Amino acid sequence: MPTLPPKTPGVYRDDVVPRPDFTLLTGVPAFLGFAGQGPVGDPQRLTLAAQFDDLFGTPLASGYLGSAVRGYFQNQGHMCYVVRLPDAGAPASALTQTLIDLESRDDVDLVCVPDIMRPPTTGGSVDRTAVRAMQLAVLDHCERCGDRMAILDSWPLATPGDVLQQRRELRGRGSTGANAALYYPWLWVPEPRAALGRAKVPPCGHVAGVYARTDRRVGVHKAPANEELDGVLDVEVNVTDADQGTLYPESVNCLRAFPGRGLRVWGARTLSTDPAWLHVSVRRLFVTAGRWIERTMADVAFEPHDVLLWARVERELRGYFSGLYRQGALRGASEEDAFYVKCDAETNPSDVQALGAVVTEVGLAPAVPHEFVVVRLVHEASGLTITGPARPG
């Protein structure tokens, strides 16, 4: 609001310090892969699928980068980054270096590398050992950054037994798996250049679009599951209830065809063995909260370490978490049940203050996805009674 003009003529100073509104975008993937042209290693921002051809040329017939980007936008993705990997040298080394360069991008919260599944030679098969090494590199990257999740593809032509083996091999090198999710099987999509007018592609691009769609419609606390896949003709493998009964306890998220309901994402679990981080939506809620705090509260650095600073930290965090509670991201009869924020002399004793650090303790009660709905049928002499649905304890 401008100040009133002074009554005496002269030059007066009027300091205006605007605080711009901040909107944290989610469902923004970085797609890494091979292309025929375009800058190498430099993330390019895309808001339309058609921009891919303008920047990177016609998608390579031997790769999956173009189809992943197209699948993302077909499923209502809104913005992504595409990073072209160098063609020369070992693919694993090129990927590792590109991931290091990508760490500074703070507007990316998903990572997809569909060309990990590209065969080393035309007409050859996927080198599963190399795939494992590169997927572990992506896992390490997301865990090290702490502000993004990996959407991983299953092996092509994989049976349920193959996918379980792949899942077991992704437990390694100390990664918790909390920042990654694995999807099975591959998808058949329209491809005019292919002999049959269709081609098989890894699912990460289409699934990333589903993440973006549910984020915009509800929020990151909504599990990106029971959502229809657009731009897909069929799944490579028809996953049965028995198959999923084996795969889902091992946190393999299935893509399934349901009569009358189309092709759907039917699972939303991370690769973590920690029950606290089992669900994609819960993990992404905490990751997104961390991103928001880092972005909006960076200006508390170098402020006087006193009660006023502690009060400000508590006030801003309470406001943010209160908004999450109203959205349904947190559970509880009241805000006091849903979250707490503590920043005071107890969390910041003198030795902590001497280090120039501000310690805030935060507790959140996330709304856990309702994975299993039980409807009870009671058969009595008087007839049939249906109770439910209920969540099994």
Image (cartoon, rainbow, N blue to C red):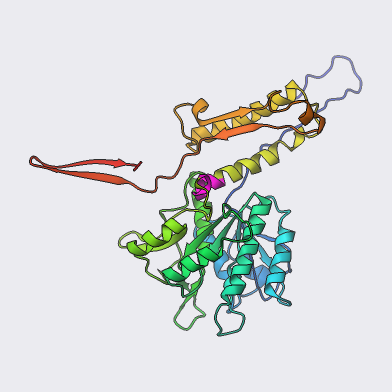
Name the spot of residue 135 as percent of width and height, x first. 60, 65
Q: Is residue 345 magenta?
A: no
Is 133 displayed left or right of 76 in the figure? right
Task: Give above or below for 59 relative to 277.
Answer: below
Q: Is residue 279 magenta?
A: yes
Name the spot of residue 278 as percent of width and height, x first. 50, 49
Task: Give above or below for 306 relative to 62.
Answer: above
For the point 44% across and 27% down, the residue is 333
Q: Main secondary structure of the magenta part?
A: helix
For the point 56% across and 77% down, the residue is 126
For the point 51% across and 63% down, the residue is 167
Q: Which of the image's four quarters has the C terminus? A: top left
Name the spot of residue 19 as percent of width and height, x first. 72, 33
Tell which of 165 and 257 is nearer to you. 165
Is 380 displayed left or right of 200 in the figure? left
Does residue 325 show up? yes
Quadrant in which residue 304 is drawn = top right
Q: How many numbered discs, if any? A: 0
Quadrant in which residue 17 is drawn = top right
Does residue 187 show up? no
Quadrant in which residue 376 is drawn = top left
- Magenta part of the chain: 276-284
Tell which of 342 and 20 is nearer to you. 342
Q: Which of the image's four quarters has the N terminus? A: top right
Outermost residue, right side: 10
Outermost residue, left side: 381
